[in-house]
Image: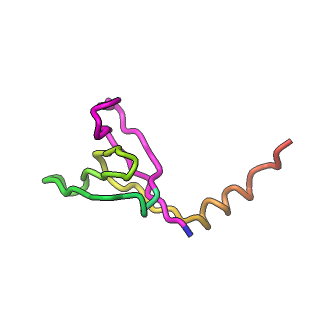
Amino acid sequence: MADFWIIEYTKRLHEEGESNTYETHPQHVAVDVDSVVTIDKTKSKSNHTFIVDTGWAYYGRILMKVTEDDVMAEMEKLPPAR
């Protein structure tokens, strides 16, 4: 089963320098825990840089941990597709 972190970030950087963004309002991304290559600690107590195997790095904090079971339980609440 896959575990995910919901990361709230204010800066997103790509290793090739593509699409670097600095957000004025926090953004959120779901990241598979197994895809996190490195967590660079910063001087901040809660914000760090999460480097993912897709080449993206997110500067922010872990907002919550979600398991695949959590996702499946929420999907079961949705109405059936037409």
Q: Residue at point 46% right, 58% down?
A: 32
User: Farthest residue in the front direction?
Assistant: 16
Side of 59 where 67 appears, left or right: right
Residue 8 image position (x, y, % from top left): 38, 46
Q: Residue at point 80% right, 49% down?
A: 79
Q: Nearer the viewer, residue 19 or 46?
A: 19
Vertical order, 72 against 51 (above or below): below
| Most frequent secondary structure within the magenta stretch | strand
Q: Which residues are magenta?
A: 2-31
Vertical order, 62 against 1 (above or below): above
Side of 40 where 30 appears, left or right: right
Q: Quadrant of the N terminus?
A: bottom right
Can residue 68 be found in the magenta stretch?
no
Its colouring scheme is rainbow
Q: Residue at point 32% right, 52% down?
A: 61
User: Farthest residue in the left direction?
Assistant: 43
